[in-house]
Amino acid sequence: MARAGSGSLATILLLLISQAALLKGAAQDPVVSQNLVTDNVAVVEGETAIISCRVKNNDDSVIQLLNPNRQTIYFRDMRPLKDARFQLVNFSENELRVSLSNVSLSDEGRYVCQLYTDPPQEAYADFTVLIPPGNPIIEAKDEVLSEGNETEMTCTAMSSKPAATIRWMKGDKELAGKPKVELTYDKMYTVTSRVAFAVSKEDDGVPVICIVDHPAVKDFRARKFLEVQYKPEVKIVVEFPQGLTREGENLELTCQTKGKPQPQRVNWVKVDDDVPTHAVITGSDLYIENLNKSYNGTYRCVASNPLGESYDDYILYVYDAPTTTPIPTSAIITTTSITTTSTSNPKANQDSRAGEGAPRTVDHAVIGGVVAVVVFAMLCLLIVLGRYFARHKGTYFTHEAKGADDAADADTAIINAEGGHTNSDEKKEYYI
């Protein structure tokens, strides 16, 4: 009891001293001096704040801290104010540092650091209480969207101090929103941002994010994923053959579809004609055996869903089957035959969509070789025949009718000729 009484007495004396000092200071207006300094404070509601009064050059003057109502919180190291949330952190000749725990909005205002000099010196610390917004709420005008339509979304950040700012992102692209700020009856701020944009099929599953910026919180956001419906996408893929489609071969086509909702059924038709009777259609696959040119035409795969219908076309052109070309033969050489396989035009060796037949060509190297052989054989034949005729060709001179030219009549010529047979030298033949 004695200790309690002495403590109360000391408090009363302290208050009397401070009041006397205040009355003395009231006679002279306090001045703001660079010798006494403090800092503004911003703290989130419910957390702990630190208020510091610092003196650069102290001449043993008393330091005290006053609340916004100019009530003494601390006089030197004594706390006259009965608020246990205020606690002394440090006291020295050059500093008075006080903590305030469990900060509330009612604690906001201007706090005063006062140094008892003549005249008194004061420094002011603006105390700001930050109140973070509640969880952002994002709302969409349409839950399910159709390709090409426009939608609208709103994001709300409620009961904050100061007012929050809101940004929008669609995937990695920033959107421009229209904010609206409202001040509530309890001096809080509610911010609503609205954004409108058109959607495409590429936006299906893309997140739209509402980002709230506020001094009291970081990376505060809400998101909503877009659900966009679109009509089917159709593509025909050739499974077989890999090159040109030729007579006698088989054809297999697959119809690939994508859409939202996914098409449940696809149809195969032939434009301006009927699908061959023996063609087999299994789900999205079309199979035709033993192709011939009567099957030429445009084959179409059609897919649909509630948003529309789409198709893809395949132009079938059946080329001739591979054939063999006989090689010309010569009577001079042994009869032979060389088989050559026609080759297709490389530019047409893709699929039947070319729509024009690729002309068959033979191997020119083989043909050139055969022609060279024939020409060589003919030259050899000509040489042989020339040598043969040359060996059996000549001019013969005889003396059997020698003297006939000088005879007066035929009988004399005969007699002269007969007389000449006796000389063997005159009967020699000369071959040139």
Image (spheres, rainbow, N blue to C red):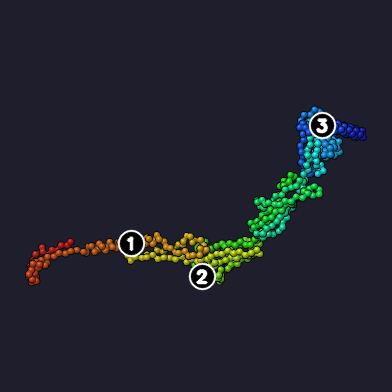
In the image, residue 97 above or below residue 399: above
Earlier residue among tags 1 and 3: 3
- SS label for mark 3: loop
Residue 358 horizontal/vertical position (percent): 47, 64
User: At 47% across and 60% down in the image, what residue appears?
Assistant: 346
Which amino acid type corresponds to the residue marked 3 in the rendered image?
Answer: Pro
Residue 351 or residue 108, whichever sits in front: 108
Q: CA distance from mark 3 to mark 2?
A: 112 Å
User: At 83% across and 32% down in the image, what residue appears?
Assistant: 28
Residue 333 horizontal/vertical position (percent): 33, 64
Q: Which mark is residue 245?
A: none
Residue 328 or residue 35, whichever sits in front: 35
Location of mark 3 (residue) = 120
- SS label for mark 2: helix
- SS label for mark 1: helix
Q: Which mark is residue 375?
A: 1
Location of mark 2 (residue) = 294
Q: Neighbour class for label 1 at 10 Å: few (<14), some, many (≥20)?
A: few
Q: Neighbour class for label 2 at 10 Å: few (<14), some, many (≥20)?
A: few
